[in-house]
Image (cartoon, rainbow, N blue to C red):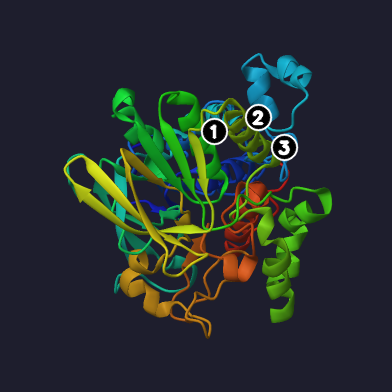
């Protein structure tokens, strides 16, 4: 994409994963149905090409949400960017229906995202990392005020400045490793799994271990057991086995668009109840069919007397010792504070989750305009716009990092279409024009 040097965009999107892709779609559909000046937008992504959790696109791994919770359908059921439209364009709609499954494979859903993204090559620039945002001294006031966004070309190192009235920050989650644990060619985080695994000679992997009790941990354990029939595979669990994800209809209502209002406008007691009663819909839980499959395999091995799938329950990794290609894991039992054991592995995978997005470092000096709550977190309006001092009229929208204000769906796909539509509505309304971008028909 070629950004115009002197143009002041209505919004610059920082990051171009599913969230800002959905925002781009919402803005386009508004433009197609509005008589006023179109909303101008540019997006910058530090990756070389579009990609969404590529290193977890494991064979047969399925989505944990319905295909209807795509980039647009909940906001605009007739959008040309829906998953159904993708199936029709791919000549697979009939076959998908005959498959009688609400949950496509992760690989197919990624293909859908790539299909949608291919329509926005004129608005997104890859290999482009936003390194800072500032309010220049001559930036003006009110609706004329603008921000300067510094963008570094990751290939050449060259930096340029783009101007915009608003920014939408969607830089994604940050892989989380236990304290004191470092990643290398033998110690991996699940976010890099397929890439790191692909560099290894499978014959060298005789003993592998996976740390964690969530969906990614269980899927990787299953994958290694499939791909390495000669290897010992150990699952190191801080819990007493895997816990099943609650995807029953009433529990799933926590991901409904209306639940965001209930959380945002609710009391502290309300918000606490959301997390206490419904955390098991998404965090540190595993789909029922994966749990049953792993248990079945373990049982069949016991019957056959050829055990190679091992579950170390109530166990944490205390230390990882590296010496050349040798990796020794020191384990601590939660059953006995004095108990400790060591095991040698050829690869160790930490499926230990992610930290939420924090825009503080990216905002830099601009953060001084942003108001925070008593816990030091950004205050955020219902439209995902950071609450700022009167001196800043430009908008800072967050697509992520708002769990404390908007609840469980802050950065999840479940509410992505509605969330992006609400941000697009906010942009249009703040320009003094009537919204809604909800219908793109």
Q: Secondary structure at mark 3?
A: loop
Residue at the right extreme, as displayed: 250
Which residue is at the front of the view, 176 or 181? 181
Residue 286 image position (x, y, % from top left): 63, 46
Q: Are marks 1 and 2 in contact (CB under 8 Å)?
A: no
Residue of label 1: 113
> Measuring 53% from the left and 58% from the top, which residue is drawn there?
314
Circle nearer the viewer, 3 or 2: 2
- CA separation in Å, label 3 and label 2: 10 Å
> Measuring 57% from the left and 30% from the top, which residue is drawn there?
301
Which residue is at the front of the view, 238 or 250? 238
169 to 118, vertically: above or below: below
Residue of label 2: 104
Left or right, 391 with respect to 2, comes to right
The mark that comes first in sequence, 1 or 3, is 3
Residue 289 image position (x, y, % from top left): 69, 36
Residue of label 3: 68
Q: Secondary structure at mark 2?
A: loop
Which residue is at the front of the view, 240 or 120? 240
- Mark 2, residues whose alpha carbon is within 10 Å: few (<14), some, or many (≥20)? some
Left or right, 235 with respect to 67, comes to left
Residue 235 image position (x, y, % from top left): 49, 45
Residue 322 in view in this figure: yes
Location of residue 280 (image quadrant): bottom right
96 to 193, vertically: above or below: above
- CA separation in Å, label 1 and label 2: 13 Å
Q: Secondary structure at mark 1?
A: helix
> Measuring 69% from the left and 69% from the top, which residue is drawn there?
276
Residue 205 image position (x, y, % from top left): 33, 30
> Measuring 28% from the left and 49% from the top, which residue is drawn there?
328
């Amino acid at each position: 994409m070629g950004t115009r040097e002197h143009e002041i965009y209505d919004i610059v999107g920082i990051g171009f994963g599913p969230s800002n892709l959905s925002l781009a779609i919402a803005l386009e559909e508004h433009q197609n149905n509005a008589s006023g000046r179109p909303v101008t937008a540019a997006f910058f992504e530090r990756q070389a090409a579009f990609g969404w959790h590529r290193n977890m696109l494991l064979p047969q791994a399925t989505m944990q949400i319905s295909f209807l919770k795509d980039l647009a359908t909940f906001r605009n059921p007739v959008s040309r960017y829906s998953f159904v439209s993708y199936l029709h364009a791919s000549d697979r709609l009939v076959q998908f229906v005959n498959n009688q499954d609400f949950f496509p494979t992760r690989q197919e859903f990624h293909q859908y995202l790539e299909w949608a993204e291919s329509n926005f090559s004129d608005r997104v620039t890859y290999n482009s990392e936003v390194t800072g945002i500032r309010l220049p001294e001559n930036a003006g006031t009110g609706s004329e005020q603008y921000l300067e966004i510094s963008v570094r070309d990751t290939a050449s190192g060259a930096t340029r400045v783009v101007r915009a009235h608003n920014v939408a920050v969607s830089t994604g989650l940050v892989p989380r490793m236990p304290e004191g644990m470092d990643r290398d060619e033998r110690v991996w985080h699940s976010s890099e799994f397929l890439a790191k695994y692909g560099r290894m000679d499978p014959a060298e992997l005789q003993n592998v271990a996976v740390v964690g009790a969530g969906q990614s941990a269980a899927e990787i354990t299953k994958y290694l057991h499939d791909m390495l029939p000669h290897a010992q595979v150990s699952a190191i669990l801080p819990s007493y086995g895997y816990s099943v994800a609650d995807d029953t209809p009433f529990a799933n209502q926590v991901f409904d668009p209306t639940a965001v209002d209930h959380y945002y406008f609710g009391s502290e007691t309300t918000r606490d109840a959301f997390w206490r009663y419904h955390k098991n819909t998404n965090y540190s839980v595993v789909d029922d069919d994966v749990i049953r499959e792993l248990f079945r395999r373990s049982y069949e091995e016991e019957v056959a007397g050829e055990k190679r799938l091992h579950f170390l329950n109530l166990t944490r990794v205390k230390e990882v010792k590296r010496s050349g290609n040798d990796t020794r894991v020191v384990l601590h039992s939660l059953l006995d504070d004095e108990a400790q054991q060591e095991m040698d592995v050829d690869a160790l995978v930490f499926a230990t989750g992610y930290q939420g997005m924090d825009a503080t470092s990216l905002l830099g000096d601009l953060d001084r305009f942003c108001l925070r709550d008593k816990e030091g977190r950004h205050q955020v309006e219902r439209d995902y716009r950071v609450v700022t001092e009167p001196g800043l009229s430009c908008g800072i929208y967050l697509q992520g990092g708002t769990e404390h204000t908007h609840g469980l769906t802050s950065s999840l796909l479940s509410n992505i279409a509605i969330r992006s539509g609400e941000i697009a509505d906010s942009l249009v309304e703040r320009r003094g024009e009537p919204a809604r971008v909800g219908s793109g028909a």
